[in-house]
Amino acid sequence: MPGSYGADSTGLVCGFLFNQDGATAISADDARAWLALPERQPGFVWLHFNVAMAATERWLSHLPLPASFMHALNTSSRSSRVELEGETLQAVLNDVLFDFSFDAAEISTLWLCLDCRMVVSARSRPLRSIDRLREAVRTGARMRSPVELLVRLLSLQAGVLEQIVRDSAEEVDRIEDRLLADRLERRRVNLGSLRRVLVRLQRLLAPEPAALFRLLNRPPEWIAQEDIDDLRESTEEFSAVLSDLTALHERIKLLQEEIASHMNEQDNRSLFMLTIVTVLALPFNIVAGLLGMNVGGVPLAQHANGFWIVVSLVAALTAAAGWWAWHKWRG
């Protein structure tokens, strides 16, 4: 099977057959042949596809998949959800890209369809959680059922999201330290970008726990009780991570308000200093303008100490303006 993110001619990125001996790599044609066997074979298959390839949907039409799943691949609705269609479990999950760099555009969708014998997953771009699951299976991870595969995927997704929250919290801590040290620079832009990523993650992932809890209340008969318990535990773990994400989002919002208040205070101080300079220069400008008029009757023009009298008058007016500005500043 291909070891990279590339897919074969059918769009298959990877395929595995799970049985009592573990996981074995399987091709798309072999998987279809195994699913077509009349007798009930122990185990199940997992097929992971790249829907960005034109051949993928044509090949998927040969599998026993519900029409609603094929329709979901072409819809624009990306909110996370888990639905029960007859005896088939369908899920729309959202995850970050494999090379995620805290960009709101680096979040994409993963579609899943599973029953008691088959798990089909599809994505248009490489995703981090599903790749970790693929590597875990390749290195010997055992799965007793399709639902356990889903539980493992949700746990990995929660781990990826938790790491994002942890990294985001560290960045927020650094920005907050710079704010307290009055060395903020241009970190407000970083906070805005980080907040957009967290808001998008929260909007796309928030419906997921509620949908899973609805499923746990009325699970299909082919899901074992052990799998239901694992799914409930994974859902609670995911809900805890979403709570941390919400708390971090609120913290960023408060920090942005504090930064805005700090910047407004700096702007007000700068504007007030400019006002003080203007007030202090006002007496000089007024007196210079009056004495510079080319008209008769300029006072003290013939006085022996006229210059010093004018200087004293201007100094007194400037001192009065400075005293007023100082009390305004202190007030």
Image (cartoon, grey):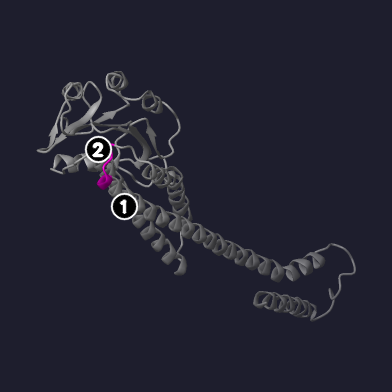
Q: Quadrant of the C terminus?
A: bottom right
Does residue 55 lie above or below 100 as drawn? above
In which quadrant of the rendered view does residue 171 lie? bottom left
172 left or right, relative to 25: right
Q: Secondary structure at mark 1?
A: helix
Which residues fall within the magenta stretch? Answer: 222-227
Q: Which label number is shown at residue 233? A: 1
* Residue in the foreground of this view, choosing between 94 and 100: 94
Does residue 33 lie above or below 102 as drawn? above
Q: Secondary structure at mark 2?
A: helix
Instruction: Indicate yes or no whether the magenta region holds residue 29.
Output: no
**Dot 2: few (<14), some (14–19), or many (≥20) neighbours within 10 Å?**
many
197 left or right, relative to 254: left
Does residue 227 lie above or below 255 as drawn? above
* Residue in the foreground of this view, choosing between 6 and 154: 154
Q: Quadrant of the N terminus?
A: top left
* Residue in the foreground of this view, choosing between 101 and 61: 61
Point out residue 131 in the picture as x, y percentages from the top left corner: 24, 40
* Residue in the foreground of this view, choosing between 138 and 163: 138
Instruction: Indicate yes or no whether the magenta region holds residue 224.
Output: yes
In which quadrant of the rendered view does residue 284 lie? bottom right
Question: Which residue corresponds to mark 2?
Answer: 146
Point out residue 101 in the picture as x, y percentages from the top left corner: 34, 46
In which quadrant of the rendered view does residue 61 lie? top left
